[in-house]
Image (cartoon, rainbow, N blue to C red):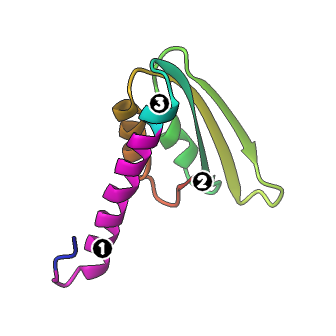
Amino acid sequence: MIIKNNNNFILFMAGKEEVFYKKLKTQLKETTTFPTDYMYKFIVPADRNQVQEVQQIFDKGGVVVNTKKSKTGKYVSVSIIISVLTADEVIKYYRKAEKIEGIISL
């Protein structure tokens, strides 16, 4: 739903995100047996502390975090494997991560 005001684009994107997460939740429920080990993949700029911000979101025992710098050194790939109990928990982590400046979810 789009509500017209000075932030039309932001409201449109927020609605688009909700559709994305609803679709993801449906797909996860159809294809995944919970609890499960789920892999998150992100790309973040290498010039700030975004890698640490991502790691803080997933600061939980038993988490496997791998990082790899791009060839140019401008970006860092972050892969995280974490045990999750539900589709809602998967989405909860994506929502937290999307607040990090410059992050790209894969």
Identify which amino acid the numbered label 3 is placed on.
Phe
Q: Which residue is mark 1?
A: 12
Is 101 included in the stretch rendered in magenta? Answer: no
Is 15 placed left or right of 4 in the picture?
Answer: right
| The furthest residue to the right | 71
- Where in the figure is residue 26, as x and y percent of width and height? 39, 42
97 is higher (above) or lower (below) than 33: below
Identify which amino acid the numbered label 1 is placed on.
Phe
Decide which of 96, 3 is in the foreground and name it. 3
Q: Which numbered disc flags the more N-terminal residue, 1 or 2?
A: 1
Is 5 included in the stretch rendered in magenta? Answer: yes
Q: Which residue is mark 2?
A: 44
| Crowd around label 1: few <14 · some 14–19 · many ≥20 (10 Å) | some
Is residue 57 visible in the rendered structure shown here? Answer: no
Give the numbered dot on residue 98. none
Question: From which residue to which does the magenta span run?
Answer: 4-27
Please identify the dominant SS of the magenta region.
helix
Is 81 placed left or right of 32 in the picture?
Answer: right
Decide which of 71, 35 is in the foreground and name it. 35
Mark 1 vs 2: CB contact within 8 A: no
- Where in the figure is residue 61, as x and y percent of width and height? 49, 15
- Where in the figure is residue 60, as x and y percent of width and height? 46, 20
Q: Which residue is mark 3?
A: 58
- Which residue appears at 42% of the width and 52% of the height? 98
Q: Which numbered disc flags the more N-terminal residue, 2 or 3?
A: 2
Decide which of 7, 87 is in the foreground and name it. 87
3 is higher (above) or lower (below) than 18: below
State how far apart marks 1 and 3 are (Cα): 29 Å
Q: Is label 2 in a helix, a strand or a loop? A: strand
Identify which amino acid the numbered label 2 is placed on.
Val
The quarter of the picture where residue 86 lies is top left
